Image (cartoon, rainbow, N blue to C red):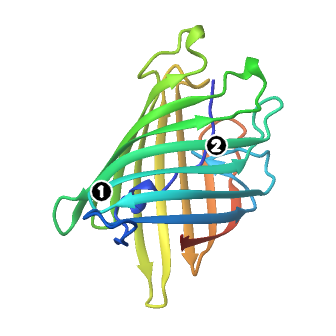
Amino acid sequence: MLKLKKTIAISAIALMGATSLTSTAVHAEVTANAAATSNYLWRGQEQTGGDAAISGGIDYANESGFYAGTWASNASWADEMTYELDLYAGFGGDINESVSYDVGYIYYAYPDAASEADADFSEIYGSISVEGFTFGASVLATSAASGDGTDFGDSLYLTADYGFAVGSNGTEMALHLGHYSGDFIGDDNILDYGVSISKDGFTFGLSDTDMDDSDIKAYVAYSVDFNL
């Protein structure tokens, strides 16, 4: 069964600057984010039937590299479902001036989905970033559908991303390629790909998969982050 969600830029959270929250020696930062998009896509697939989505989250990160957070959005890809709630934690940092890493755990919850949807699941993820390239992997950890024979490791999502500046005015372009495989999804192998361009919080993107009857999907989004 195929589960759908956006890719969260968790590695960036782990590397945030430090702001003292307590009188202890550990410096930390709490931030919040809010976003709106014309089409909520996760791994190239629609989460709201092509409708718009509003999302927001809160993140904690400290100078050790530890981070944790939660994120919510409207979602409607299963019966009676109206929203998604994600919980995640991990650890990230720099290996040297050009290489960084990120590892963590994320739980995807759909609290009001019909019980027969068996929607909730979780993954363990990791990534390595080198200059503008990021290579990542996410492995199924748990699933509400375990009674149907779904086990740890029954899905694997591999990604390759590249981001770069366009000109000197703050515009950025990102290229994405992903491969989703395993018994957890309806199709044993799904390839997704996309391109986006961003500036001042606004993003325009195109995304698609190699699934039958899949069309290129365009979206426009705006996001904002702020300290708490």
Query: Which of the two residues, 13 or 136, is positioned nearer the viewer here?
Result: 13
Horizontal and vertical percent for residue 30? 47, 64
Name the residue furthest left: 96
Near mark 1 (Cα within 10 A), the count class, few <14, some 14-19 or many ≥20, is some
Near mark 2 (Cα within 10 A), the count class, few <14, some 14-19 or many ≥20, is some
Horizontal and vertical percent for residue 126? 34, 44
Horizontal and vertical percent for residue 78? 76, 31
Asked which quadrant contains residue 103, the reply is top left
Point 66% across, 64% down: residue: 35
Q: CA distance from mark 1 to mark 2?
A: 23 Å
Q: Is residue 61 shown above or below 148?
A: below
The answer to whether one can see residue 137 in this image is: yes
- Find numbered disc 2 in the image and state the secondary structure of the residue it sits on: strand
The amino acid pointed to by label 1 is: Gly
- For residue 103, the mark is none
Residue tagged by mark 1?
A: 65
Q: Determine whether, in the image, residue 23 is placed left or right of residue 187.
A: left
Horizontal and vertical percent for residue 165? 42, 79
- Find numbered disc 1 in the image and state the secondary structure of the residue it sits on: loop
Name the residue furthest front: 23
**Label 1–label 2 contact, CB within 8 A:** no
Point 48% across, 29% down: residue: 181
The amino acid pointed to by label 2 is: Leu
Residue tagged by mark 2?
A: 85
Point 18% across, 58% down: residue: 95
Asked which quadrant contains residue 109, the reply is top right
